[in-house]
């Protein structure tokens, strides 16, 4: 019997396991695979690659959500993707890159740079700092520094130099493309590639629910999400599966 998996992440938020889509993806992956885990508040500065999530298991420390998933698969703890054919793997890789390397910066922009997003999101960051036991008097200072680092990174990456309307359009373009891919596969089954979940389902849920569910204003209105019906249906399917497994993401984070 191996040790339980320990995930180091940030903090929970309405409708998602964690503020980080990468942490959410990893937690969802474990829940759907029936693997027990313990979640702890991490500190990115102490993480092996300076980012969260990372996991600890059987005396090893594994960085990065995707590397962790590969480790768990190789250890035989989860078998989500073993049945995918080469075409499905190629689609999952391409679309995962679109979400993790492109849409991710849109998400960061909307939460950290957009004034109406930050006005709400900063309360979740204060919650995180409390959970990290940062003294109350230091919290504003730490948060100001974290925001200025994030905005500098966003600017260096390029997304931070764009106008709000461009970022909103980028989000629409990405989600419209994803919705078209999903609609083409809807007859295959309720999960992205058919009758059972694969790792890619956890990526889609992390980003789509991560934009749609939390109470953080975006550069697009909530009504616009109706333009992506296949993605809404996919998200609802994941949520109802979680309900069957006893996880209610709609419940307030502290009462899950
Ligand atoms: N490729 C990584 C990405 C992880 C990542 O970007 N994590 C961000 C939060 S969403 C982070 O830890 N940022 C903290 C920092 O850069 O200081 C993965 O899949 O785990």
Image (cartoon, rainbow, N blue to C red):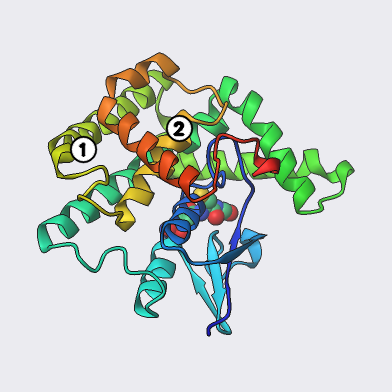
Q: Nearer the viewer, residue 109 or 160?
A: 109
Judged left or right of residue 87, residue 131 is right
- Residue 123, given in percent of the width and then of the height, sits at 70, 32
Residue 182's disc is 1
Q: Is residue 158 visible?
A: no
- The residue positioned 23% from the left and 53% from the top of the image is 92
Q: Nearer the viewer, residue 31 or 132?
A: 31
Q: Nearer the viewer, residue 24 or 232?
A: 232
- Seen as rendered, the residue at the extreme front is 244
Find the distance from the CA under tag 1 to the CA under tag 2: 17 Å
Q: Are marks 1 and 2 in contact (CB under 8 Å)?
A: no
- Residue 141, given in percent of the width and then of the height, sits at 78, 41
- Residue 164, given in percent of the width and then of the height, sits at 43, 21
Judged left or right of residue 115, residue 243 is left
Q: Is residue 223 above or below residue 137?
A: above
Q: Secondary structure at mark 2?
A: helix
Judged left or right of residue 183, residue 62 is right
Screen quadrant of the C terminus: top right
Q: Mark 1 or mark 2: which comes first in sequence?
A: 1
Residue 211's disc is 2
- The residue positioned 65% from the left and 44% from the top of the image is 146
- Seen as rendered, the residue at the extreme left is 87
Labels 1, 2: front one: 1
- Residue 36, given in percent of the width and then of the height, sits at 54, 66
Q: Is residue 248 visible?
A: yes
Question: Residue 105 lies in what quarter of the image?
Answer: top left
Residue 229's disc is none
């Amino acid at each position: 019997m191996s040790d339980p998996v320990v995930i180091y992440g940030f903090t929970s938020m309405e409708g998602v396991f964690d503020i980080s889509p990468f942490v959410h993806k990893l937690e969802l992956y474990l829940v759907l695979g029936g693997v027990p885990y313990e979640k702890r508040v991490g500190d990115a500065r102490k993480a092996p690659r300076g980012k969260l999530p990372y996991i600890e298991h059987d005396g090893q420390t594994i960085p990065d959500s995707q590397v962790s998933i590969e480790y768990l698969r190789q250890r035989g703890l989860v078998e989500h993707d073993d049945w995918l054919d080469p075409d499905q793997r190629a689609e999952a890789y391409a679309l995962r890159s679109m979400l993790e390397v492109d849409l991710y910066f849109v998400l960061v922009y909307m939460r950290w740079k957009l004034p109406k997003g930050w006005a709400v999101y900063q309360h979740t960051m204060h919650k995180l700092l409390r959970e990290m036991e940062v003294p109350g008097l230091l919290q504003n200072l730490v948060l100001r520094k974290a925001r200025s680092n994030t905005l500098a990174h966003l600017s260096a990456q390029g997304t931070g130099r764009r106008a709000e309307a461009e970022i909103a359009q980028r989000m629409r373009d990405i989600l419209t493309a994803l919705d078209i891919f999903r609609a083409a596969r809807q007859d295959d089954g309720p999960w992205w590639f058919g009758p059972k979940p694969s790792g890619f389902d956890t990526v889609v849920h992390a980003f789509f629910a991560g934009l749609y569910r939390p109470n953080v204003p975006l550069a697009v209105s909530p009504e616009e999400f109706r333009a992506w019906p296949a993605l809404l249906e996919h998200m609802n399917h994941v949520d109802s599966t979680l309900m069957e497994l006893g996880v209610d993401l709609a419940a307030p984070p502290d009462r899950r």
